[in-house]
Structures are given as structure tokens and as C-alpha cells.
Image (tube, rainbow, N blue to C red):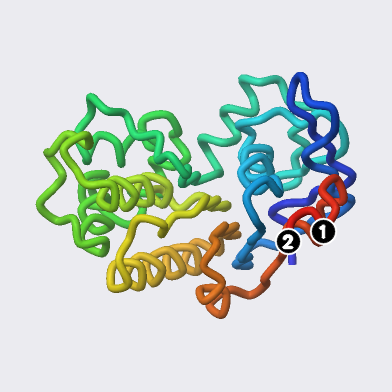
Amino acid sequence: MALAIDIQNVRFRYAGAAADCLDIPLLQVEAGVRTFLYGPSGSGKSTLLGLMGGVIQVQQGTLNILGKNLVQMRPAICDRMRADHIGFIFQQFNLIPYLSVMDNILLPCRFSLRRQQRALAESSTLEGVARRLLSRLQLEKTEHIPVTKLSVGQQQRVAAARALIGKPEIVIADEPTSALDADRQSAFLDLLLQECTEANAALIFVSHNRQLAAQFHHEISLPSINIAVPIENTL
């Protein structure tokens, strides 16, 4: 099976820091594989997701996304790669506050012709695709509401719909269920896994709730692969 993500000897250190926060000799994720990633605060989870998504620039090593090395890409090309191929559910959501729910969800299709075409392959309109996702996320009556009027849990689900529209080949989710109650968490996870399965997308899912791990193909402790942070310091 083809690799969606191939990380080898990647190291990263924030400006002014005395030591690396990430030093990962090897991490590979195949297309269509669901990976549950966990670890305590400070173990580098969000930094690793930022590197995978091209949001943070790799300083050393090789990071291949869909066969292309992000380390060798100019920033503008990296941005295009992310827009076309990666759906990112950020921990802080990163919704555009002055846009409606619908306009936030449709943003990836505005920036990426590839995502737009993939969305239109399943419906005659982009709005139709967005409404299907909203319905599955129990947000049917919110499409015209400014996102600032929504609850935190609703905003989290809107961020998920935005990441999934256009069936990206890689979905990166940083604590995507943290603000959801048990029922909505279950419905959300069902949708996320179904959409990724239908698109044969690789899913990287970070959570502190290890009860969710049973629904994933692989479960990885970040401290076990990040040699920059000694395991005894993460307990």
C-alpha cells in the first residue's frame, strides 16, 4: 500500500529553545489507514501535526506527503499542497469569524480547484455537499449563522466539516472531540471514519481519550517515537 506520510529523521526546535522538541527517526502512515496518536502535554503532538500539514516548516530530515518532500518545497507550493490534499481540524478551530457557517465550510473549495471538483463529483452544488455534512453533524439549521454565534462544540463540528469537504487524501485532527458530549462525539467519529474510508484517506487523530483508540487501525504513543523527549519525563 502506498505511503501517505513518510517521516524520517525529522527534528524540530523552536526559536530560542535549548533543545529539540521533536526528534523522530521514523513514522510512516499508509493511505487509508486510521492512526490514533496520544501523549501528554508537551510531548510535541501539535507540533508534529503542524509539520505534517505543512503549517510548520521542517528544519531537518525528510517529510514526504503523498510522495512529495515538504522540506524541498517553496512555501507557496507547500500551501498549495495543503489546500489540495490535506484536511486539517485545528485544536483552536481557526474558523473565519466574519463568515457564516456555510462560507467557512466551503473555504477549501474556494482555494482548491481539486477539492472543488472532488466535492462536485458527489453533488451538483458545493452547498449540497456542505449541507450533507452539516446534517450528519446535527447542524442542519446553522448554515447562515455567523460562526461566532455558535457554541464551542458547534464550532468544532463546523471545523470538521470544513476539513472533510472535497475528500482530501489526508485528514489531520487535533483533539477534534474535546468539546463534544458523548452522543455528539459518537456521531462525529462515525462521520469522520466513514468519510475517510470512502475517500481512502489517511487519518491522523490526536486525543487524550484512549477509549476511542479501538476504532483505529494503529495506536501510537508519541513519546515512544519522539526521542527528543525522554519517556520518563512524560509520565
**Left or right of 161 in this view: 193:** right
- Say if mark 1 contacts mark 2, CB within 8 Å: yes
Which quadrant would the C terminus be assigned to in this image? bottom right
Q: Is residue 191 above or below residue 118?
A: below
Q: Nearer the viewer, residue 178 or 232?
A: 232
Crowd band around label 1 with a 10 angstrom C-alpha radius: few (<14), some (14–19), many (20+): some
Instruction: Name the residue that disc number 1 marks.
Output: 231
Gap in angstroms between the C-alphas marked 1 and 2: 7 Å
Crowd tier of the residue under label 2, counting other residues whose Cα lies within 10 Å: few below 14, some 14–19, many 20 or above? few
**Residue 80 sits above or below residue 123 on the image:** above
Residue 197 percent across, percent down from the top left = 50, 69
Nearer to us: label 1 or label 2:
2
SS at mark 1 in the image:
helix
Residue 178 % position (x, y)? 41, 57
Q: Residue at x 30, y 66 (%)?
A: 181
Q: Quadrant of the N terminus?
A: bottom right
**Drawn side of residue 233 relative to residue 184, left or right:** right
The residue to which callout 2 is attached is 235
**Amino acid under label 1?**
Ile
The tag on residue 170 is none
Left or right: 7 in relation to 218: right
Per the image, label 2 sits on a secondary structure element best described as loop
- Which amino acid does the dot numbered 2 rest on? Leu
Residue 187 horizontal/vertical position (percent): 32, 70
- The residue that appears at 32% across and 61% down in the rendered structure is 180
Q: Nearer the viewer, residue 220 or 40?
A: 40
Q: Residue at x 36, y 45 (%)?
A: 159
Q: Is residue 18 left or right of residue 126?
A: right
